[in-house]
Image: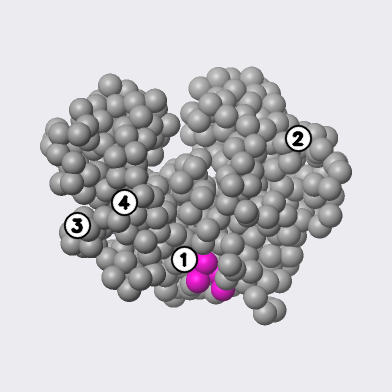
Amino acid sequence: MMNPLHDIAAWRGRPGPSGIPSVCSASAMVLEAAMRATLPTALPLLVEATCNQVNQEGGYTGMTPADFRAFVEAIAAAQGFPLDRLILGGDHLGPNPWKALPAEEAMQRAEAMVSAYAAAGFTKLHLDCSMGCKGEPTALDDATTAGRAARLAAVAEASLPGGDIPAPVYIIGTEVPIPGGAMEELGELELTAPEAARTTVEIHHEAFAAAGQSEAFARVIGVVVQPGVEFGNHNVIDYDSAKAGALSAVLGDLPGVVFEAHSTDYQRRANLAALVQDGFAILKVGPGLTFALREALYGLDAIAAELHPGARPRGLRATMEAVMLAQPANWDRYYEGSDAERALQRHFSYSDRIRYYWPQPEAREALDRLFALLGDAALPETLIGQHLGARYADVRGGRLAPQARALALASVEAVMQDYISACGG
């Protein structure tokens, strides 16, 4: 079977989609909304897990790659989303989760992770060995990075499950700043230099050949670059097509390759469309989707407080504050300022580090209580206007049911529609 992404570089030259969103989330509601939004389109659905989120040791979700596949496929079955339109990917696969260890030990763990992803049938693998391990520089030179990526490609190729699952396509390269959004307020971004993008491909080509992985390199379809988009805790840097012109032009020298843009969250629809038109055909989005879901959930929390005062021992927002304060590891070192400023960021930062806490038992219980309390009742339009204003027009127009779950899913679907439209879906 041919990998559906094998010819993505040719999509712009024919009718139909010219790019694809990459949904980077382990939220069941986000994935359900993504499937609902994608189902009526001509696009497959690309869902990706990161090395820290899902790995052979469980990651922060507690899921191995096989577990994640089962998790996503169960949601697809419930939604009637065809499995042959589902693509699973692994993001930043390399030693990053174990970079505090010596390089060889970290790489052995990375090999086990890549093997688990490949064996579980993930068919888009981003190999990223750019980070230094114990005793190494923070960022490694191109030759070392490429050599380690080729080593991981060999492991992946040896672990393929065969059968009807197509061979994986590969993504190489990395972006600056760090994955998942910058910590500080951002100003001007440094785009990837055109020559650096070209060099990344050339050096990986050589490293794969030296490792006997030329066949795998023939399935390299994308390079991660920095096109000038990013978000921090407080602000978003918008895409400027003119500034990215020289970088975009490099694709003319790289047949069969597109650019993959990370941290495209919160870009406006016109900017997303410009990215795809300029050859940044794979658009990664994650925190932007969970941010939209959190907005909706907090709106429903406020509506529940109006309709059912005193019915819960503690509301959803108060519960999330308690959970985050009790377990600060996922936000404390990322948020700066006074106590009041940090409290605001815990809930409303663009980096949306609250997303790490929704799987916590106390958070899940609070969310279950909220949806049980609101049930399938029609919520007052006036309260929807007050607390979920972006959904009001669709409710008034009869296009959206004024029910809690429908309103939450629609909030995520609205973000997905920006990406689907930008990709020509």
Mark number, residue 142 = none
Mark 3 — residue?
Answer: 383
Q: CA distance from mark 2 to mark 4?
A: 45 Å
Q: Closer to the observer: label 2 or label 4?
A: 4
Q: Are marks 4 and 1 in contact (CB under 8 Å)?
A: no
Of 232 and 20, the residue lying toward us: 20
Residue 421 included in the magenta stretch of the image: yes
Q: CA distance from mark 2 to mark 1?
A: 32 Å
Q: CA distance from mark 3 to mark 2?
A: 49 Å
Q: Closer to the observer: label 4 or label 1?
A: 4
Q: Which residues are magenta?
A: 419-424
Name the amino acid, label 3. Leu
Q: Closer to the observer: label 1 or label 3?
A: 3
Mark number, residue 119 = 2
Callout 4: helix, strand or loop?
A: loop
Q: Are marks 2 and 1 in contact (CB under 8 Å)?
A: no
Name the amino acid, label 1. Gln
Q: CA distance from mark 4 to mark 1?
A: 26 Å
**Looking at the picture, does residue 363 appear above or below residue 414?**
above
Of 64 and 386, the residue lying toward us: 386
For the C terminus, the quadrant is: bottom right
Q: CA distance from mark 3 to mark 4?
A: 13 Å
Mark 1 — residue?
Answer: 417
- Sequence-wise, the earlier of marks 2 and 1 is 2
Mark number, residue 377 = 4
Secondary structure character of the magenta stretch overall = helix
Q: Residue at x 31, y 66 (%)?
A: 395
- Sequence-wise, the earlier of marks 3 and 2 is 2
Asked where in the image residue 128 lies, by quadrant, the reply is top right
Residue 388 included in the magenta stretch of the image: no
